[in-house]
Amino acid sequence: MNTQRGFLLPVLALLLFACGSPRYADGVFTGRSGADDTGAYADVTLTIQNGLVAACRFVTIQKDGTVKDENYGKVNGEISSADYYAKAQLAVRAMKTYEEQYLRSGSLDQVDVISGATIAYNQFTEAVENALGAARK
């Protein structure tokens, strides 16, 4: 009788854990956020291996299709306003931070909002949720 209990308890615990946690299919999944008030949106690409997120790529894209990168905040290739460029680049740096925090923790709840990059955060979480929705078994 004790042998059966010793066997059944771990099996029951495993079943409860498996039923309570999301299960994701392995592969590459993408998610897109809605557009913000300027028409910009975000795309996230998640690589899932063994049911866990192994890689995350997050980009935000302006209404005209331009990716927000080191040139975001420039006008005609030049920094016309240092303040505007600094704020734009804060959002670009935040995108990388959001990726890293998510990969490190495995949870959107553990990704900290960066002051000045709240729109990017909202787009990130929405796009990740959409990608994970596509990955759910």
Image: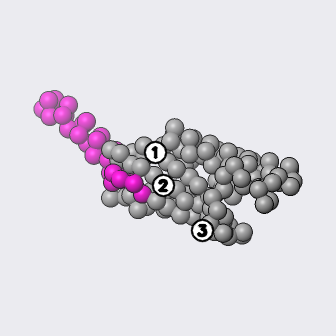
- How far from the left and from the top, in percent, is residue 45? 48, 54
Membership of 129 in magenta stretch: no
Q: Earlier in the sequence, mark 2 or mark 1?
A: 2
Q: Which residue is mark 2?
A: 45
Label 2: how many Cα within 10 Å (few below 14, some 14–19, many 20+): some
Corner quadrant of residue 59: bottom right
Left or right side of 63 for 126: left
Q: Which residues are magenta?
A: 1-29
- How far from the left and from the top, in percent, is residue 137? 32, 58
Q: Which residue is mark 3?
A: 34
- How far from the left and from the top, in percent, is residue 109? 56, 47
User: Label 3 is placed on what type of residue?
Assistant: Gly
Q: Which residue is mark 1?
A: 55
Determine whether the residue tagged by mark 2 lies in a helix, strand or loop. strand
Q: Earlier in the sequence, mark 3 or mark 1?
A: 3
User: Label 1 is placed on what type of residue?
Assistant: Ala
